[in-house]
Image: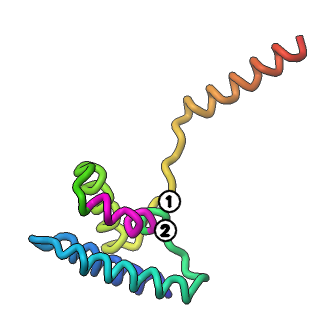
Amino acid sequence: MDLAELRRRVGAILEEEERDPVDWSQVERLTDELYSSLAQQPDTVVPELVDHFLDDADIRAKAKNAGYARRQREDVRHFVQTGEYVDSTPLPRWTCLLAVALLVALLLWIFL
């Protein structure tokens, strides 16, 4: 499946979720069909955000975390409209510096 087809099918799921009221059985059906198609085409690259979106329909349906659901839909909407996505959350610089400092401190402690 190419990226355009993936975007179209994810867009259909997103559109279904944005109806009022949401037919969650239809969302589940569309999601299952997409999963089935992806299983038949293992070479398809599925962005992490799409994978999470497909997996988390139950969380969005139960409104456990409205902020998480809203953010997920915004990110997926951006992907559907533009094809652009970011697949991971970059680590802040300070965490990398902290890891290096801890490693240096550990090595100094061991060898001195």
Q: Main secondary structure of the magenta part?
A: helix
Q: Is residue 11 magenta?
A: no
Secondary structure beneath label 1: loop
Circle 2 residue:
47
The residue drawn where x is 43% and y is 62% is: 52
Residue type beneath disc 2: Pro
Q: Quadrant of the C terminus?
A: top right
Q: Position of residue 85 (x, y in %)?
A: 43, 64
The residue drawn where x is 39% and y is 69% is: 54
The residue drawn where x is 45% and y is 80% is: 35
Question: Looking at the rendering, which quadrant does residue 107 occupy?
Answer: top right
Magenta range is 51-60
In the rendered structure, the answer to whether residue 70 lies left or right of residue 8 reads left
Residue furthest to the top: 112
Can you say whether 56 is above or below 43 in the image?
Answer: above
In the rendered structure, the answer to whether residue 43 lies left or right of residue 14 reads right
Can you say whether 50 is above or below 28 in the image?
Answer: above
The answer to whether the residues at label 1 and label 2 have Cβ atoms under 8 Å apart is: yes
The residue drawn where x is 30% and y is 51% is: 68
Q: Nearer the viewer, residue 25 or 103?
A: 25
Can you say whether 65 is above or below 32 in the image?
Answer: above
Residue furthest to the left: 20
Real-space CA distance between mark 1 and mark 2, rounded to the nearest whole angstrom? 6 Å
Q: Position of residue 67 (x, y in %)?
A: 25, 49
Mark positioned earlier in the residue sequence (1 or 2): 2
Secondary structure beneath label 2: loop
Crowding near the residue tagged with mark 2, few <14, some 14–19, many ≥20 C-alpha atoms within 10 Å: some
Circle 1 residue:
87
Question: Looking at the rendering, which quadrant does residue 13 occupy?
Answer: bottom left
